[in-house]
Image (cartoon, rainbow, N blue to C red):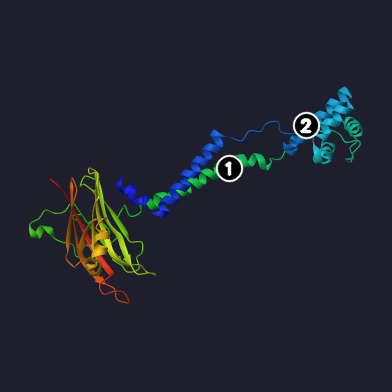
Amino acid sequence: MDTIREQLNKPLVVGIAALILGLLLGVFYAWVISPVEWTDADITGLREDLQVDYLRMAIDSYAYNKDAALATQRYSELGQNGEQVLSEVVANPSSVRPEDITAFTVAVGASAPLMPGVTAEPEGEQPTTGSGLSRVLLPLLCVVVLVIVAGLAFMFFFRGRSGRPSMGAPRSPAGQAPETEWTDYTSAGEELPMVQFMASYKLGDDLFDDSFSVDSPAGEFLGECGVGISETIGVGEPKRVTAYEVWLFDKNDIQTVTKVLMSAHTFLDQSARQRLAAKGEPVLAEPGTESVLETQTLRLVARVVDMGYGEGALPEQSYFDRLILELAVWPKV
């Protein structure tokens, strides 16, 4: 739940989630709750091929009952399309006799060109109209859009969960150490950590937010830990980071434990320190500094392996130029 809350604090994630929900609700409403229903529609709403069939039936009816008034009414219902549809019937009468077409044309006073002597030919397959095609394409396009959006949402929700290829990769006891030296806890008489990670920040990494899955040696998911930007100072690009949030999530605990690593300038600023204390316990970042985070079943030690401050117009020691943070996790007995 805490991970979900953290993701929902990101505007981009909220926007993607709202888009997916809006598309789903829109499709459900349009196709299930309130689908389009045509009631008492006139002949002009039919496809062109159906209007031609309608006029053929009207001609056959007039040939049988000789009711000129009824024939005129049926022909007038085609509106402005009447002459065009009649021309289509003349060109392709199907089972309608040419003499019946001529008689109908005279009865309704139409001026469509006639083609005496036209013989009936088998009617070919009617062309597919855009209306029928759109009924198939619309739901298909909706599904494609939903799949694309869901894929993007998955990438943003779960990015970084699998670790980083170098500094962010977890270290197993038999694994090869990265360029930065790992802390050897066994030399101090301590138990080997269950997992170890390295998170590395450099000035300009404005999206810095490393998170790692904490798994047991048997592969069981136990929780997550990570570090991300908590506070910046000044304006402009790149961002000048003055504080980081180090956090530990335990699947067996209801609360995510957080500590805030601060620059010397921010730590000594009483108002800034009090403001950031709402996010977690303030800690002054110095090389070798260790911060302990404990949950119900996990214990994490965050050690500052290396760090440096940026220089410029901002106050001295106010923002970080680089930071390498080691995260070691043990199960609590």
Question: In terms of depth relative to the viewer, which is nearer, 307 or 330?
Answer: 307
Residue 242 appears at what percent x and percent y? 28, 66
Question: In terms of depth relative to the viewer, which is nearer, 317 or 52?
Answer: 317
Q: CA distance from mark 1 to mark 2?
A: 28 Å
Q: Tag 2: Cα neighbours inside 10 Å, few (<14), some, or many (≥20)? A: some
Residue 166's image quarter? bottom left
Q: Quadrant of the N terminus?
A: top left
Q: Which mark is residue 54?
A: 2
Residue 301's image quarter? bottom left
Q: Residue at x 92, y 33 (%)?
A: 106
Q: Tag 1: Cα neighbours inside 10 Å, few (<14), some, or many (≥20)? A: few
Residue 53 appears at what percent x and percent y? 77, 32
Q: Residue at x 53, y 37 (%)?
A: 29
Q: Does residue 123 appear anywhere in the picture? A: no
Looking at the image, the residue that sits furthest to the front is 271
Label whose residue precedes the other's in the sequence (1 or 2): 2
The reply, left or right, for residue 36 in relation to residue 8 is right
Residue type highlighted by circle 1:
Leu
Question: In terms of depth relative to the viewer, which is nearer, 172 or 21?
Answer: 21
Q: Is residue 135 above or below residue 269?
A: above
Q: Residue at x 59, y 40 (%)?
A: 136
SS type, badge 2: helix
Q: Does residue 11 appear anywhere in the picture? A: yes
Looking at the image, the residue that sits furthest to the top is 65
Residue 94 appears at what percent x and percent y? 81, 32
Residue 13 appears at what percent x and percent y? 41, 52
Q: Which mark is residue 138?
A: 1
Q: Is residue 325 above or below residue 254?
A: below
